[in-house]
Image: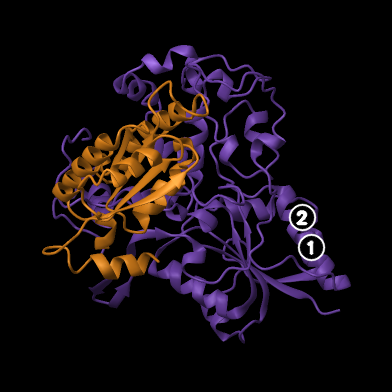
Chain colours: A purple, B orange
């Protein structure tokens, strides 16, 4: 039986997804049994020109992790799409933009100027910024162009499957590899295109913590209280994105006594994870019978206990959210509170 | 859809720009209030579209975000007065959500005044008219939805 070919590529991500694939322990031997690694920059020595030389559709499945935020990311994603039969959007950054996606809160200009000029440790007297093309005595050198917006993988190329998680858990990876293996060995059908390789339910369904009142009195940061490891995080006043997050990770963070931050992304029928969480959190505040007496200011004070709704509710999904990117009003806002 | 909205509203921005307002009315109070304003022939701007929901709490934050993403210049959510909700506490949930959603919209760069919550009962046709007039004025001052510019 001919071996299948797999590849993995690393776009705007941290590399954790590549390690997650190595982390499947002895199962990696099963992978080696059915598959050749065609391209995987972190693990094997294949060059971009080798990929360019492959015929179209040569690679059976390519896992791409990381968001798309520069010209190289985009070029490689498009190249690998052309050379692969299946593309898996691997990890939260590829699926929803992930943590790098929070750069959509600002702009390319602001990022470059802060990083190269204004950080406390910068001493950039000539105000040098990276330039995509630069002439040196040896010739011209090039670096990729940074984009103003961070994109998800499926905003740039066609994607066959999604595997969210930061990084995807060993179980999910094994589940997917098992499906591919069965497909190769026994001809079992693959899941329909566009499937998300995870659960269809919310994380609360997988979480072992006890829920009783489903009410939150006051919001705390995790360090402010002793967290009861048996009791629902939200009932203790800690913002946990469980109600708006897709299950499939096994609620590992909750097992480790940390709240969910939402890396698995929105649930199946939801477009906007942040909006979903905002709705859930606002609904469970325990106010009692006096709510008709509260003024609008009281309500605002209550709700602004959530200090940073955008950063909290969209920690992994801003580029995949409905609004996607910060906008700029032409007229200055009536009361500039920030800065 | 987003492109359509963009094509329509972007170029006409300076002169002849008409704000697009979306108004969510709850079935029991505000929609009846809007109806009363209509049958009383109260004059008001005509650049708003009403969507009737069973309760103001049915207005998922996602609906509001989608409205802005598709180019609405302002979103108005109308519900029953506190203590008058047909479903006992729906309007309280709405009030908390809208308060937080306005903070979120501001973080996204929108002027939070583009989203407004108001209580309109079934007998308040006049208040419906006033609310629409005021909201229209607010949005005209703010100008077009910035998402249409991009």
| Residue occupied by mark 1 | A179
- Furthest-right residue in view? A186
On screen, residue A275 above or below A195: above
Q: Nearer the viewer, residue A172 or B69?
A: B69
In the rendered image, which quarter is residue B12 located in? bottom left
Give the camera-side residue of A148 and A142: A148
Q: Quadrant of residue B33?
A: top left
Residue A264 visible to the viewer: yes
Q: Measured from the top left, where is residue A231 in percent x and y?
A: 65, 20
- Output the chain of dot 2: A
Rendered position, B70 above or below A312: below
The residue most toward the front is: B40
Residue A24 x/y as whole percent: 73, 51
Image quadrant occupied by the N terminus of chain A: bottom right
Of all chains, the one bearing label 1 is A
Say whether residue A8 is left or right of residue A35: left
Q: Residue A124: x, y in percent? A: 18, 50
Q: Measure how far apart labels 1 and 2 are at the Cα level.
A: 6 Å
Q: Which residue is mark 2?
A: A175
Front residue of this view, candidates B124 and A124: B124
Q: Secondary structure at mark 1?
A: helix
Residue found 58% across the figure and 28% down from its top: A258
Q: Residues within 10 Å of mark 1 (few under 14, many from 20)?
A: some
Task: Check whether the beta carbons of the residues at disc 1 and disc 2 lie within 8 A of each other.
Answer: yes
Q: In the displayed structure, does residue A146 sit left or right of residue B63?
A: left
Residue furthest to the left: B15
Confirm whether circles 1 and 2 share one chain. Answer: yes
Residue at the image position 47 percent from the left and 66 percent from the top = A155
Q: Residue at x 37, y 26 (%)?
A: B81
Q: Secondary structure at mark 2?
A: helix
């Amino acid at each position: 039986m001919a071996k299948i070919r797999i590849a993995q590529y690393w776009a705007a991500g941290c590399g954790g997804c590549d390690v997650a694939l190595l982390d499947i322990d002895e199962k990696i031997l099963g992978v080696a049994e059915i598959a050749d690694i065609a391209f995987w920059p972190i693990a094997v020595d294949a060059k971009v020109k080798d990929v360019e030389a492959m015929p179209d559709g040569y690679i059976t499945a390519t896992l791409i992790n990381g968001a798309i935020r520069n010209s190289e990311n985009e070029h490689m994603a498009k190249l690998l799409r052309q050379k692969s039969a299946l593309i898996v959007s691997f990890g939260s950054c590829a699926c929803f933009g992930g943590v790098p996606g929070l750069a959509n809160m600002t702009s390319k200009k602001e990022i470059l100027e802060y990083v190269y000029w204004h950080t406390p440790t910068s001493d950039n007297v000539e105000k040098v910024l990276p330039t995509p093309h630069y002439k040196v005595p040896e010739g011209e050198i090039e670096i990729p162009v940074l984009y103003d917006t961070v994109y998800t993988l499926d905003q740039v190329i066609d994607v066959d499957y999604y595997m969210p998680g930061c990084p995807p858990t060993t179980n999910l990876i094994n589940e997917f590899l098992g499906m591919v293996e069965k497909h190769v060995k026994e001809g079992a059908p693959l899941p329909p295109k566009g499937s998300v390789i995870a659960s269809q339910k919310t994380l609360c369904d997988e979480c072992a913590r006890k829920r009783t009142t489903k009410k939150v009195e006051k919001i705390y940061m995790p360090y402010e209280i002793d967290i009861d490891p048996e009791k629902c995080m939200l009932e203790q006043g800690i913002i946990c994105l469980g109600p708006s997050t897709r299950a499939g990770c096994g609620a590992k963070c909750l097992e480790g006594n940390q709240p969910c931050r939402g890396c698995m992304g929105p649930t199946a029928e939801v477009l906007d994870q942040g909006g979903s969480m905002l709705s859930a959190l606002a609904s469970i505040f325990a106010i009692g019978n006096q709510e008709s007496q509260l003024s609008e200011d009281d309500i605002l004070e209550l709700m602004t206990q959530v200090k940073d709704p955008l950063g909290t509710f969209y920690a992994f999904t801003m580029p995949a959210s409905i609004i996607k990117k910060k906008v700029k009003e032409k007229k200055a806002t009536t009361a500039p509170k920030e800065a | 859809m987003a492109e359509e909205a963009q094509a329509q509203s972007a170029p006409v921005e300076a002169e002849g720009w008409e704000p697009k307002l979306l108004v969510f009315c709850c079935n029991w109070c505000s929609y009846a209030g809007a109806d009363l304003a209509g049958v009383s022939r109260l004059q008001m701007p005509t650049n708003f579209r009403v969507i009737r929901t069973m309760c103001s709490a049915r207005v998922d934050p996602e609906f509001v975000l989608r409205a802005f993403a598709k180019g609405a210049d302002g979103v108005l959510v109308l519900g029953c007065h506190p203590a008058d909700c047909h479903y006992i506490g729906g309007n309280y949930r709405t009030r908390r959500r809208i308060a937080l959603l306005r903070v979120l919209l501001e973080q996204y760069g929108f002027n939070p005044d583009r989203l407004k919550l108001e209580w309109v009962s079934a007998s308040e046709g006049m208040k419906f008219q006033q609310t629409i007039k005021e909201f229209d004025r607010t949005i005209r001052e703010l100008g077009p939805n910035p998402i249409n510019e991009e």
